[in-house]
Image: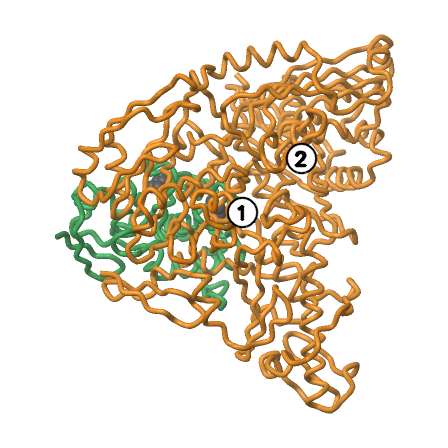
């Protein structure tokens, strides 16, 4: 049995050591907001925060998580996360939505580090996240919007 | 471990031993839901108004990102005069009697950018019907004439001060007579249609991780299946040894099916490990022998031979004899994978009544029939829960029902012992076929001394998408698959002498429509060649096109708008030292929607390039949701750029050489241009926007690169250096 800290809760899981964290989250624990896109650390659909750092859960064996604190899309919280989600909703970034958990996790990590990112910062931080619907144009705009929200220029409340 | 509870109207809620996290695996089951429906006003198949004041709109079309749920809801809510906030969207069940696509005859499905176009009248009437019944109920209750009752934002009111919500009147309204010909609004009274920023209905669930995709379905007792497919198209299973696979912890069963060998396990990881541990022998005698180089050689030979005539006007031979100048180019378009973000998957379970399916379902009627044929049951015994699809771009609308059939075979081979979630890995998805076909084109253009178009000859070589499918009778005539030549055979540019012909070689590489279908290649060949003709004539590319579009005012309309908004007549700002800059234009009509795009590129001294800015003008008739239209143009441009700049599927002896995003690169954020979308006001009936943003971008960029460097690009994806 492995002990994992996910979204502030401790879970005990019975999984082979080589099982990627992604499949433990999705198939064992039911955190299906984190998506499978490539399985090879190429697309970012599976991004979660590990101790606050964006991490590709498809390529991280569950045994390597150790005492690390995992945060998934279901558990992200704090000012950057709230701002990102509010901005995403305000600009209606999503299309199919399948990549968006990963995009939001990556954008949250970026804003936690750099509350006022430039376009170049955004392109660098988000380059690992593929969106086949190509919502990139709005992702960029929404990150700037989130930055403004964090600076208190707009509300971070999600509409019902 | 799993505990399943029924909750009203919400189907099965899977709670499970999830550390206290309750609502995680929320499973819609159409069957359970239908059984638990409370009484409410449901005058037709598309709307239900409940006493809790909710308005549920039943969407017959798949939401795969294109905004169909929002669009369908907007049309109906408009005529109903609902408050947007009270409107919810629910997926329609598979039932072609009620939910057929009116542009597809008796078939239910989503595609060809037809969702808005075919639903427009139907949903307006559905909304107006419900509204009329609410009004009748209020008139009866308040004892006032119906004509004196006003409806706005989900409220009915009368000058006397009487007021009611939809919910208050739903039960009484349900007893009113259903009007036959409810009056529809004058478009000038639209409040939701055309509104600049109506929030999408699927946004919140998709930004909180709650949206349910097929990949997320988890039924009690369900096993995940991963399948070993043949390494080459056309190969078949000879034998397999599952001894090691069965030793993998979590593997439950291994079964042979027509498309390979399926490993069923608790969870994806065990299933995949089991699949990878199989020892397999394949019979490759019927495998596709060619690789891409051999195919291209074979197709090139066909470029020299006349094909089936797709269109012929005037005297093309004579036009070329009398030409002062002839332009000629051969084009190459590779196979393309759809590579939607959600790899293909399907969930199925068998019970005593038949089979229940969970799928990002794009072609209900065909999939029902195909799945039913596997089990020997009736199509109506196959019920389908249409879930959000994580993209599709055409891949989930397969007349061959490849992956639903595969899932059905697995369920059948395991005698329905477990619900099955079939999951294709990214590699399975990339190598699974059903590609945009590989095409070659030859285009020859005859010009007079003044550069005017005298003749246009175009030969297309590539597999037919529709031949051998139920759509053949409708789309293939005299050996010409309309989807192979659309956009060329009906060339919009005025030319007295036109001939387009086609070779459709048959081979065992499965092909399929790919976002914007034939226009993905015809649009490129036509729009780059007309640009060359303009250049040869010494004319401005926009003016040259406009002069040939007299009979096509909507092409001309978007072209003029895009030129104006892009500042076409002002010089492009120079680049940094050593950089070359260029601007290019293209205009393509597809699926009844007209789109023109201007691309600005910067070519660096090392031959690398960047698409810096794209201006887009679109005329799709009445703009139902302007923001969704903008999003689809933006996304279509990005999707088209992937194909222009990066992606190709190639074969080696019938085996696909690519496998994942490292060798099938797609556009990433750093390459996304700035995009501005302008919508041409129109009162024509609305047409679709999911596909039409794609075709103009590759030729617009190629024309921009030619303007910058003088180099014309005939092969996709582009190679500049
Ligand atoms: S699924 Fe992990 S990066 Fe693609
Ligand atoms: S929204 Fe569809 S892949 Fe990003």
> Which residue is outermost to the front?
B376
* Side of B38 relative to B684 (left or right): left
Residue B526 location, x and y as percent?
Answer: 71, 25
Residue B296 visible from this viewpoint: yes
Quarter of the image where one finds residue B289: top left
At x 40%, y 16%, the residue is B285
What colour has chain A?
green
Q: Nearer the viewer, residue B529 or A39?
A: A39
- B101 sits left or right of A102 in the view: right
**Disc 2 crowd, CA 10 A, few/some/many (<14, 14-19, 20+):** few
As helix, strand or loop, the secondary structure at mark 2 comes to: helix
- Residue at 33% of width from left, 36% of height from top? B227
Give the distance between the C-alpha atoms of the residues marked 2 and 1, in whole angstroms.
20 Å
> Whole-percent x and y of residue B278?
24, 31
Quadrant of the image for the N terminus of chain B?
bottom left
Disc 1 on helix, strand or loop?
loop
Which mark is in front, 2 or 1? 2
Mark 1 lies on residue: B362
Q: Is residue B713 visible?
A: no
Residue B490 lies in what quarter of the image?
A: top right
Q: Quadrant of ligand 1?
A: top left
Marks 2 and 1 belong to one chain: yes
Task: Name the foreground residue: A118 vs A16.
Answer: A16
| Chain containing mark 1 | B
Question: Residue B267 location, x and y as percent?
Answer: 27, 47
Mark found first going from the N terminus, 2 or 1:
1
Q: Residues within 10 Å of mark 1 (few under 14, many from 20)?
A: many
Residue A46 on image: x %, y %: 34, 46
Indicate the chain on which mark 2 is placed: B
Q: Residue at x 64, y 51 (%)?
A: B101
Question: Which chain can be seen in orange?
Answer: B
């Amino acid at each position: 049995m492995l002990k994992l800290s996910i979204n502030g809760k401790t879970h005990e899981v019975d999984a082979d050591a080589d099982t990627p964290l992604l499949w433990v989250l999705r198939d064992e624990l039911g955190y299906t907001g984190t998506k499978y896109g490539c399985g090879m650390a190429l697309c970012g659909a599976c991004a979660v925060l590990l101790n606050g750092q964006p991490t590709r859960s498809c390529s991280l064996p569950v045994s390597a998580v150790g005492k690390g604190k995992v945060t998934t899309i279901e558990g992200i919280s704090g000012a950057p996360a709230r701002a990102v989600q509010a901005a995403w909703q305000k600009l209606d970034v999503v299309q199919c939505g399948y990549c968006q958990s990963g995009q939001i996790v990556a954008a949250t990590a970026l804003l936690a580090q750099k509350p006022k990112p430039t376009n170049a910062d955004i392109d660098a931080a988000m380059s690992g996240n593929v969106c086949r619907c190509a919502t990139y144009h709005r992702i960029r705009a929404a990150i700037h919007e989130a930055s403004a929200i964090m600076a208190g220029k707009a509300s971070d409340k999600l509409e019902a | 471990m799993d505990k399943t509870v029924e909750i009203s109207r919400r189907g099965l809620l899977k709670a499970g031993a999830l550390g206290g996290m309750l609502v995680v695996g929320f499973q819609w089951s159409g069957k359970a839901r239908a059984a638990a429906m409370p009484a409410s006003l449901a005058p037709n198949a598309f709307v239900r108004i409940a006493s809790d004041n909710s308005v549920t709109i039943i969407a017959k079309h798949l939401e795969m990102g294109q905004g169909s749920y929002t669009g369908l809801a907007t049309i109906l809510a408009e005529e109903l005069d609902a408050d947007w906030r009270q409107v919810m969207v629910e997926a329609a069940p598979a039932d072609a009697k009620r939910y057929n696509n009116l542009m597809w005859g008796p078939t239910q499905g989503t595609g060809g950018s037809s969702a808005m176009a075919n639903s427009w009248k139907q949903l307006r009437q559905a909304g107006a019907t419900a509204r009329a019944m609410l009004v009748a109920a209020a008139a009866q209750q308040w004892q006032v004439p119906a004509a004196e009752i006003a409806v706005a934002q989900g409220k009915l009111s009368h000058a006397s001060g009487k007021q009611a919500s939809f919910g208050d009147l739903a039960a009484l309204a349900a007893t009113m007579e259903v009007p036959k010909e409810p009056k529809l609004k004058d478009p000038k009274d639209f409040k939701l249609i055309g509104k600049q920023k109506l929030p999408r209905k699927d946004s919140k669930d998709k930004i909180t991780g709650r949206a349910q995709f097929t990949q997320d379905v988890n039924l009690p007792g369900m096993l995940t299946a991963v399948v070993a497919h043949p390494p080459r198209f056309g190969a078949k299973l000879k034998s397999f040894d599952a001894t090691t696979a069965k030793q993998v912890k979590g593997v439950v069963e291994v079964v042979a099916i027509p498309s390979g060998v399926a490993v069923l396990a608790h969870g994806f990881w065990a299933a995949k490990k089991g699949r990878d541990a199989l020892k397999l022998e394949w019979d490759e005698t019927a495998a596709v022998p060619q690789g891409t180089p051999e195919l291209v050689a074979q197709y090139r030979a066909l470029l020299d031979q006349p094909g089936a005539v797709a269109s012929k006007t005037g005297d093309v031979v004579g036009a070329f004899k009398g030409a002062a100048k002839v332009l000629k180019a051969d084009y190459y378009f590779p196979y393309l994978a759809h590579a939607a973000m959600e790899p293909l998957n399907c969930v199925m379970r068998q019970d005593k009544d038949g089979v229940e399916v969970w799928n990002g379902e794009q072609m209900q009627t065909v999939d029902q029939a195909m799945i039913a044929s596997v089990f020997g049951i009736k199509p109506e015994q196959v019920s389908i829960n249409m879930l959000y699809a994580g993209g599709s771009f055409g891949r989930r609308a397969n007349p061959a029902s490849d992956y639903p059939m595969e899932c059905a075979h697995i369920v059948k081979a395991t005698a329905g012992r477990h619900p099955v979630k079939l999951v294709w890995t990214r590699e399975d998805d990339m190598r699974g076929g059903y590609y945009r076909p590989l095409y070659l084109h030859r285009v020859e253009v005859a010009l007079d001394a003044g550069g005017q178009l005298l003749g246009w000859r175009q030969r297309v070589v590539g597999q037919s998408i529709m031949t051998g499918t139920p759509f053949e009778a409708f789309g293939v005539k005299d050996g010409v698959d309309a989807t192979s030549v659309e956009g060329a055979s009906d060339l919009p540019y005025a030319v007295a002498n036109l001939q387009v012909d086609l070779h459709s070689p048959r081979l065992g590489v499965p092909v399929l429509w790919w976002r914007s279908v034939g226009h993905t290649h015809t649009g490129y060949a036509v729009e780059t060649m007309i640009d060359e003709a303009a250049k040869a004539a010494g004319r401005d590319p926009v003016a040259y096109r406009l002069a040939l579009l007299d009979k096509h005012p909507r092409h001309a309309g978007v072209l003029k708008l895009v030129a104006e908004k892009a500042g076409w007549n002002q010089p492009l700002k120079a680049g940094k030292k050593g950089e070359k800059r260029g601007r290019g234009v293209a205009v393509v009509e597809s699926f009844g929607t007209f789109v023109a795009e201007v691309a600005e590129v910067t070519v660096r001294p090392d031959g690398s390039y960047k698409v810096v800015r794209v201006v887009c003008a679109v005329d799709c008739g009445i703009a139902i949701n302007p923001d969704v239209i903008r999003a689809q143009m933006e996304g279509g441009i990005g999707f088209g750029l992937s194909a222009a700049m990066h992606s190709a599927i190639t074969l080696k002896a019938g085996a696909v050489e690519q496998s994942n995003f490292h060798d099938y690169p797609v556009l990433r954020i750093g390459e996304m241009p700035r995009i501005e979308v302008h919508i041409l006001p129109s009162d024509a009936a609305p047409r679709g926007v999911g596909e039409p943003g794609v075709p103009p971008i590759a030729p617009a960029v190629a024309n921009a690169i030619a303007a910058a460097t003088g180099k014309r690009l005939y092969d996709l994806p582009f190679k500049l250096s």
